[in-house]
Amino acid sequence: MAAVLAPLEAEFPDVHVVVRVRHAPPVEAVLDAAEASDLLVLGRRHHLLPLGTHLGPVARAALDHASCPVLITPELAVVAVATDEPAVAAPEIALDAAAG
């Protein structure tokens, strides 16, 4: 994850990013993270469907119960980095919104 975040942190130095790994059910982990966050950023996989027609249970729970604003990002761009970790979708959109 550090390899993916490094160029984005360099481009947006005023955006504080914290990565935490939590072993808990997804909804619980996301809502707990929202408690200590200024903005909760979640990606969505089905970018061709209209927003709201296909949101998963984690995104719906976040929109309904998060204690901070929630940004649902479309999967428009993929940042590919030579790493064993999966690519991150649309992080530049999320960082633009957080910085903005």
Image: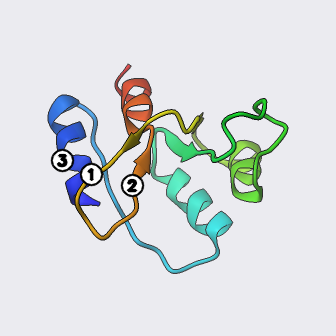
Tell me the element at label 1. Answer: helix
- The numbered mark at residue 6 is 3
* Residue 7, image x, y percentages: 18, 41
What's the distance in space between the residues labelled 2 and 3, CA to CA? 13 Å
What's the distance in space between the residues labelled 1 and 2, CA to CA? 8 Å
Image quadrant containing the C terminus? top left
State the image quarter where residue 11 is shown.
Answer: top left
Q: Residues within 10 Å of mark 1 (few under 14, many from 20)?
A: some
* Residue 9, image x, y percentages: 21, 40
Q: Residue furthest bottom?
A: 23
Residue beneath the point at 78% across and 29% down: 50
Which amino acid type is shown beneath numbered disc 1? Val
Left or right of 21? Residue 1 is left
Image quadrant containing the N terminus? bottom left
Q: Are marks 1 and 3 in contact (CB under 8 Å)?
A: yes
Q: Residues within 10 Å of mark 2 (few under 14, many from 20)?
A: some
Q: Residues within 10 Å of mark 3 (few under 14, many from 20)?
A: few
Residue beneath the point at 46% across and 52% down: 36
Residue wearing tag 2: 87
* Residue 6, image x, y percentages: 18, 47
Tell me the element at label 3. Answer: helix
Residue 4 higher or lower than 83, as above or below: above
Residue beneath the point at 68% across and 49% down: 62
Which amino acid type is shown beneath numbered disc 2? Ala
Residue wearing tag 1: 4
User: Along the polypeptide, which appears first: circle 1 or circle 2?
Assistant: 1
What's the distance in space between the residues labelled 1 and 3, CA to CA? 6 Å
